[in-house]
Image (tube, rainbow, N blue to C red):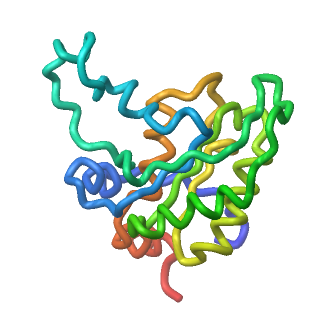
């Protein structure tokens, strides 16, 4: 095992936990102006065309009350248009604390090109919420725009119940 660099492990334990709603409460931090992206993309909008949609898509992994926006912006070329407002970020983290989230996903616009702001948010979260798992997207998914797919792929890992890590410990073998 000492020479093994990576293990890819597929299991239905994680899938079942999400499908059965047994995950933890997840908070989402996104770019200012995109707080309702999951709701809009999934047609949870009153009136208009949403009035004709009857498909119940189930609860979101990060509810709106546990979704906060940070003041920052990186353009599609990776240039910082607006620096990360750390003081405001700390205020937003207080909202997540009051919502009693058990994990946080950070998904900022254009982070696939420049992950500096997501990394900075992760560092502040380590200070403010040291025992909470944090998932950032810039180093995991390269996609050209913020969509429900990206957000859900980012929300799933931290939403998994605490029982999953012990299951993964079995891969390490005896102590």
Which residue is found at the position 33% from the left and 27% from the top?
A: 42
Q: Quadrant of the N terminus?
A: bottom right
Which residue is nearer to you in this view: 38 or 71? 71
Residue 131 spot, x, y in % from top left: 54, 77
Q: As drawn, which residue projects farthest toward the bottom? A: 175
Residue 71 spot, x, y in % from top left: 68, 44
Which residue is found at the position 65% from the left and 57% from the top?
A: 89
> Measured along the vertical axis of the image, is residue 43 above or below residue 141?
above
Which residue is nearer to you in this view: 50 or 87? 87
Which residue is found at the position 57% from the left and 43% from the top?
A: 30
Q: As drawn, which residue projects farthest toward the right? A: 79
Residue 90 spot, x, y in % from top left: 64, 64
Which residue is found at the position 56% from the left and 58% from the top?
A: 92
> Measured along the vertical axis of the image, is residue 35 above or below residue 21?
above
Residue 68 visible in the displayed image: yes
Is 37 displayed left or right of 163 in the figure?
right
Query: Could you tell me how many numbered marks the image carries?
Result: 0
Residue 97 spot, x, y in % from top left: 47, 69
Please tell me in which quadrant of the rendered image residue 57 appears.
Answer: top left
Residue 5 visible in the displayed image: no
Is 93 displayed left or right of 14 in the figure?
right
């Amino acid at each position: 095992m000492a020479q093994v660099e990576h293990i890819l492990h597929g299991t239905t334990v994680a899938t079942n936990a999400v499908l059965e709603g047994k995950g933890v409460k997840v908070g989402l931090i996104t770019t200012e102006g995109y707080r309702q992206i999951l709701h809009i993309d999934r047609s949870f909008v009153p009136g208009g065309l949403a009035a004709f949609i009857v498909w119940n898509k189930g609860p979101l992994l990060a509810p709106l009350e546990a979704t906060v926006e940070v003041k920052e912006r990186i353009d599609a070329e990776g240039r910082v248009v607006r620096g990360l407002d750390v003081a405001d970020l700390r205020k937003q983290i207080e909202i997540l604390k009051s919502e009693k989230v058990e994990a946080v996903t950070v998904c900022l616009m254009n982070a696939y090109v420049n992950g500096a702001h997501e990394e900075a948010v992760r560092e502040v979260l380590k200070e403010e919420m040291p025992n909470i798992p944090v998932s950032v997207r810039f180093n995991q998914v390269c996609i050209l725009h913020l969509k429900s797919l990206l957000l859900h792929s980012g929300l799933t890992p931290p939403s998994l119940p605490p029982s999953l890590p012990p299951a993964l410990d079995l891969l390490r073998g005896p102590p």
